[in-house]
Amino acid sequence: MGISMKATNWEFANRALVFGVIFGCSFALYALDRQSGAAVLANWLESILHVDAGLAVRALFGLAAFVLALAALLRTWASSYLQAGVVYATEVKTESLVAGGPYRRVRNPLYLATILMAFGMGALMNRAGFVFAVVAMTLFCYRLILREESDLAASHGPAYEQYRRAVPRLWPALRPRIASSGRPAHWSAGFKAEFWCWGCAAAVAALAVTLSVNWFYLILAASIALLWLTSLMLRRG
């Protein structure tokens, strides 16, 4: 069953596009329900706890921004141990195993962060959109993980099997499960590769502060454009 669920070559090469489609479809569900999930929850809190709904919405958007910042930090930490060309490669890179930083606690920190982003961005969607985004993103990331694990197992054999048994797939361990490989982190490269993630967090943070969708869309559009330019430059390079 695991083999049949593996992502195809096209899915892996175009995973950023699929991520975008998932988010796009999630927001499109506003056609069925015009009220955001955050607004619904804020109104419920107002009726139950008698807190101001406007303040509750700001707090929920602030929490979403925190989740997105956490996801950006995790992606930056993970990318600082990889080359940007590996993070955004159109094919699975199996030349080496990384055993540093977050990879000592969880095998797929980049995909874990992407799922966290679905939760964070979900605060801006309606209830159906939130559920769709989280479920679809989790399933797609799982397919990508199965594809990468299959290729890594074929390339590294017992070494990867030992790593796979020691380190959890998606739920991070509190303590490192393996010894460090000694590879240094290149934080500047990590921030450069994941700057767009910080832009997403900044966009939601701006929304929490101003409740202005104009600032949100402006920062978000700039972040998406930066991701597209980064991917294009890496492919050409």
Image: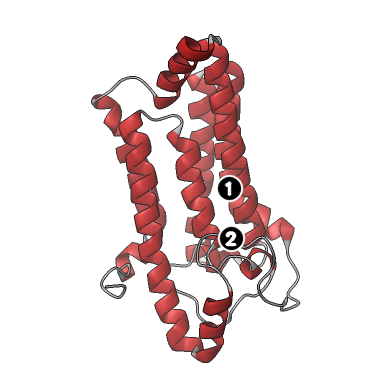
Where does residue 42 sit, x and y in percent of width and height?
A: 48, 18
> Depth check: 219 or 140 in front?
140
Q: Position of residue 195 (x, y in %)?
A: 61, 47
Residue 172 - label: 2
Quadrant of res 92: bottom left
Q: Determine whether 177 is above or below 217 in the image.
A: below
Q: Residue at x 48, y 28 (%)?
A: 217
Kindly tell me whether residue 13 is visible in this rendering: no
Q: Position of residue 5 (x, y in %)?
A: 29, 68
The image quadrant of residue 38 is top left
Find the residue positioned furthest to the bottom: 158
Instruction: Give x and y (percent) for residue 138.
Output: 39, 53
Q: Residue furthest front?
A: 48
**Dot 1 or dot 2, earlier in sequence:** 1
- Name the kind of residue labelled 1 in the image: Ala
Residue at 76% x, 77% y: name it.
Answer: 182
The residue type indicated by label 2 comes to Pro
Q: Which residue is mark 1?
A: 71
Depicted 108 relative to depicted 135: above or below: below
Q: Residues within 10 Å of mark 1 (few under 14, many from 20)?
A: many
